[in-house]
């Protein structure tokens, strides 16, 4: 039976690497991109035409719209009968300590980093609990979520990411009897064109590459990682 993985934010720098990895392992990748971002659709189309063996289907969806997300996941279940893995990659960073971070700024970070993951994880988790064999969920954490010195100047980002760690704990507590496992992958600075442009004096070799993170995420979802439980994987490179 063909394995099915949902990957949100599939056209980002990390998303393309993760999508490429799962496609290379013969998964059916159900990729989400934001509506009205044709360049993301084009990037995924180019990737799917590069001779990789898996199957790609692309869905345009706003991940903070609960009804749209529920309908999307329900349609995937109706079409494929199962979800083997769900990888929630959508997120973003905003600087600002307590003085700079008002309610609107906090709400934006919560929507982007927590709500977008929660709304997909919830129906995917329910399906995995009901199906034979369970399933795997992967959330993307961040060092500032548990490092006070790193997080105090990006308080909205740190708090929104910290909720993902608690979500993983709660899902693992409920899912352990059904072999539904949620892992947190915590990258350091990712080597992307945007980060290089923002920090041109940094040591790029110390940063972690998207392809390395993709390997870790795939391992957490694979048969090789079947024994993993309550896992926090720090993918820091030398940063």
Image: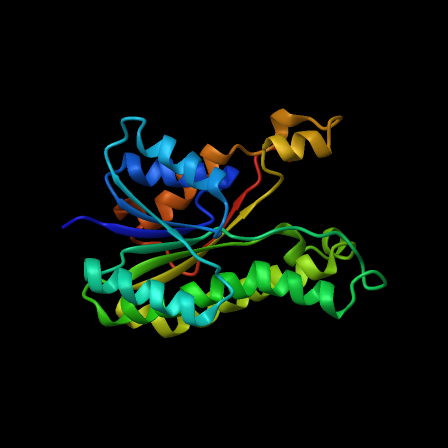
Name the residue: 32% across, 71% down: 126
205 w.r.t. 84: above or below: above
Taking the image as shown, residue 223 lies to the left or right of residue 163, namely left
Taking the image as shown, residue 47 lies to the left or right of residue 185, namely left
On the image, the x and y values in percent for residue 128 come to: 28, 66
Taking the image as shown, residue 177 lies to the left or right of residue 217, namely left
**Outermost residue toward the right in this view:** 99
Q: Quadrant of residue 204?
A: top right
On the image, the x and y values in percent for residue 135 come to: 29, 60
Q: Quadrant of residue 124?
A: bottom left
Name the residue: 42% across, 63% down: 120
Q: Is residue 172 visible?
A: no
On the image, the x and y values in percent for residue 112 come to: 58, 59
Q: Is residue 129 visible?
A: yes
Task: Give the quarter of the figure containing the C terminus.
Answer: top right
**Outermost residue toward the bottom in this view:** 174
On the image, the x and y values in percent for residue 8 come to: 43, 52
Name the residue: 49% across, 40% down: 14
224 w.r.t. 199: above or below: below
């Amino acid at each position: 039976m063909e394995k099915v993985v949902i990957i949100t934010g599939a056209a980002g720098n990390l998303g393309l690497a993760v999508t490429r990895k799962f496609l290379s392992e013969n998964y059916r990748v159900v990729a989400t991109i934001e509506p009205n971002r044709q360049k993301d659709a084009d990037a995924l189309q180019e990737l799917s035409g590069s001779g990789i063996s898996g199957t790609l289907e692309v869905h345009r969806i706003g991940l903070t719209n609960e009804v749209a997300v529920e309908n999307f996941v329900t349609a995937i279940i109706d079409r494929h009968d199962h979800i083997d893995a769900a990888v929630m990659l959508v997120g973003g960073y905003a600087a600002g300590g307590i003085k700079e971070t008002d309610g609107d700024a906090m709400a934006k970070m919560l929507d982007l980093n927590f709500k977008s993951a929660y709304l997909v994880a919830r129906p995917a988790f329910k399906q995995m609990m009901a199906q034979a064999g369970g399933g795997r969920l992967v959330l993307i954490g961040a060092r500032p979520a548990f490092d006070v010195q790193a997080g105090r100047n990006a308080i909205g980002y740190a708090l929104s990411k910290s909720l993902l760690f608690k979500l993983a704990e709660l899902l693992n507590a409920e899912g352990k009897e059904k072999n539904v496992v949620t892992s947190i992958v915590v990258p350091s600075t990712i080597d992307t064109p945007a980060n290089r442009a923002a920090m041109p004096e940094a040591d790029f070799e110390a940063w972690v590459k998207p392809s390395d993170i993709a390997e870790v995420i795939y391992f957490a979802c694979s048969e090789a990682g079947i024994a993993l439980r309550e896992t926090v994987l720090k993918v820091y490179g030398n940063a």
